[in-house]
Amino acid sequence: MLLAIDAGNTNIVFALFEGDKVIGEWRISTDGRRTADEYAVWLLDLMALRGLQARQVKEAALASVVPQAVFEIKTLCRRYFHVDLLIIGDPGVKTGMKTRIDPGSDLGADRLANAIAAWQKISKALIIVDFGTATTFDVVNAKGEYLGGVIAPGINLSLDALQRAAAKLPNVGIVRPEKVIATGTVAAMQSGIYFGYAGLIEGIVSRIRDEHGAPMEVVATGGLAALYAKACPSLVHLEPDLTLHGIRAVVEMNRK
C-alpha cells in the first residue's frame, strides 16, 4: 500500500492507496509543532478502525506547502511505517511534467500534483481550479507543460477576514442562496461570498482561455468544488482527490 500525504496550510490529509483506489482517507489540522509521535497515535488508531496495519504500508510520498511539517512527517514514516518518504519537489524526484515558470519561482507541490493528475486523466489543455486555503488556477498546455497560474484568497479565508474586520457581522456558513438580492444580513453575506466567488471563478477562467487562445478543459478540486459547480458552468470535471492521485502518479513514475 501507498501512504500519500498532502500537507496544506489548513489541513494535512493522509490517504492509503491500494493500486489506484483510495481505501482510507483522514485529515488533521495543520500544526507545524506536531510531532511524529502525535501523528502516529492519531493515524494508527484511525487505520485500525478500518482493519489496516502499519506493516501493510510499503511506500510513502508527500506533497507539502508547510516546510516546518516535513521533518516530523519524514520521521513518522521511518519510525512507524519503516519506509523512506518520497517528497515531491526534492532533487531527483521525477514528475514527468515540464514547467515554464520564471527561473527561481516556487511552485507549490500540491499545485504540481494537481496538474500531473489532471493531465493524466484528460490529456488536453487544462485549467485546474483548487478550492483550498487559497483558490488557485493552474494552466497546462496541450503538450502537457505547466505554464503558470493564478492565486486568489480562499473562500473561507475571505469570509473569515470579513467577519473579523466587521464587528457586527455574524459567522455564516457557505451555501448557495436562492437569490442574489438578499433581505437580511446573513443572506447578504452568503450571497456575496457565493456569487462573488462564482463571478471570480468564471471571470478568471474566461480570461485564461482568451489569453491562451485555444480550447481548454476545466478540472475542479477541493471541498467546495461541487457547491460552486452549481453556479459555474465552466467547472465540468470534478475530482475531489486530485492532489492525492497526483502524488500517487509521481510515486509510480519514480518506482519505474
Image: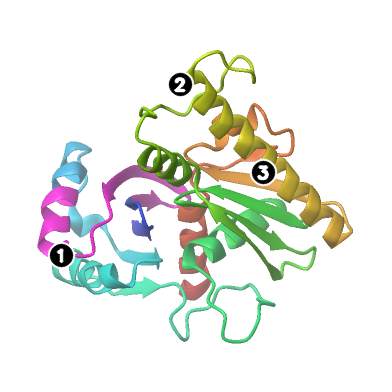
Label 2 or label 3, whichever lies nearer to me, is: 2
- Displayed quadrant of residue 232: top right
Where residue 90 sits in the image (x, y, percent)? 43, 81
Quadrant containing the N terminus is bottom left
Q: Give the number of the disc on residue 201.
A: 3
User: Few, some or many C-alpha atoms within 10 Å of disc 2 (few <14, some 14-19, many ≥20)?
Assistant: some
Image colouring: rainbow
Image vertical order of residue 60 relative to residue 47, above or below: below
Q: Between marks 1 and 3, how big is the CA–CA gap? A: 38 Å
Q: Between marks 1 and 2, how big is the CA–CA gap? A: 41 Å
Query: Which is more toward the observer, 176 or 148?
Result: 176
Residue under pointer 1: 36
Q: For the residue labelled by badge 3, is the local secondary structure a helix, a strand or a loop?
A: helix
Q: Which residues are drawn in magenta? A: 15-44
Residue type indicated by callout 1: Ala
Q: Between marks 2 and 3, how big is the CA–CA gap? A: 22 Å
Earlier sequence position, callout 1 versus callout 3: 1
Residue under pointer 2: 186
Q: Residue at x 77, y 64 (%)?
A: 141
Where residue 11 sits in the image (x, y, percent)? 33, 51
User: Few, some or many C-alpha atoms within 10 Å of disc 3 (few <14, some 14-19, many ≥20)?
Assistant: many
Earlier sequence position, callout 2 versus callout 3: 2
Residue type indicated by callout 3: Ile
